[in-house]
Image: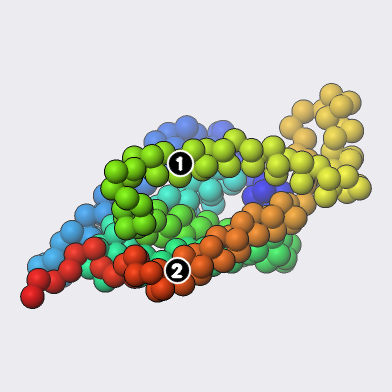
Amino acid sequence: MLQCNLDLTAASPDTFWGRSTVTIVQYLIMLAVAVCAFSSNFIKNNKALKYGLMGMAVVALVVYCYMGYMRGTAETIFAVFPLLAVAITPILGNYVDHKGKAASMLMLGSILLVVCHLTFAFILPGVSASSAAGGVVVAYVTILVLGASFSLVPAALWPSVPKLVDEKIIGSAYAAIFWIQNIGLGLFPTLIGNVLESSNANNAAVIAAKDAIKAGEEGVLVPYDYKWALVMLASLGIAALLISVYLKAVDKKKGYGLEEPNIKAEN
């Protein structure tokens, strides 16, 4: 999807940005972002150190993004996906423990999923067409927010299961959740492929690229229009939002305590 929407030119192997050593440097920077951001969440009494680590994480993240841009490949841009999640997941978990609002966090995560996929579908292609650098910036921001939305859901969902399910079958409940999740992971790549093929059946550029591949040309990119595949994924976010709204209403009615903190102050 990024390859089809961004104007990317891979760095030459003869340059610094095209060498394999850059990958190692990026891994080290990624590790620095993760360690600094994660560690800052557990420093309570030293604000200078806390914000210093957060600042270092932000600087390292910007450097990482710049290196991905200079390398000029889609995979180096998408690799930023987990970094914001690494930074905020401990914050979100701590918030649920002390403040609650798990059902509301599920709603927020679902909304971010919808916004991110619709941004990929409708905003990224237009921005990228007018400005290559602007398209990369939109892609980076959207990917980071998408990663953050992925951390919102588990941070709120996993602590909520024991509140909804009898303790005798918690193991089975978690097994059912992962069972359903893995069914989706197994089926949706095929479903996305079918949507891409059907929605691009009359796309002249796609047809020409496929003909070139059949003729034996190498390195041909098939310029699929991912709009409807992304809309389909956004619809899953809408379904999740509706379910989370229903879950919050049920919690309010039956008092499961999803909006209540896990750690309650003693009287």
Question: Residue 152 falls in which quadrant of the image?
Answer: bottom left
Provide residue 78's location: percent of width, then percent of height: 53, 48
Residue 59 seen anywhere in this rendered image of the structure: no
Residue 18 seen anywhere in this rendered image of the structure: yes
Q: CA distance from mark 1 to mark 2?
A: 21 Å
Q: Residues within 10 Å of mark 2 (few under 14, many from 20)?
A: few
Provide residue 189's location: percent of width, then percent of height: 65, 39
Question: On the image, numbered disc 1 is attached to which residue?
Answer: 176
Q: Nearer the viewer, residue 68 or 14?
A: 68
Question: On the image, numbered disc 2 is attached to which residue?
Answer: 250
The residue at the point 84 percent across, 24 percent down is: 216
Residue type at mark 2 is Val
Question: Residue 218 falls in which quadrant of the image?
Answer: top right
Label 1 sits on a secondary structure element that is helix
> N-terminal of the two: label 1 or label 2?
1
Reply above or below: 30 against 18: below
Reply above or below: 143 against 17: below
Q: Classify residue 225 as left or right of residue 44.
A: right
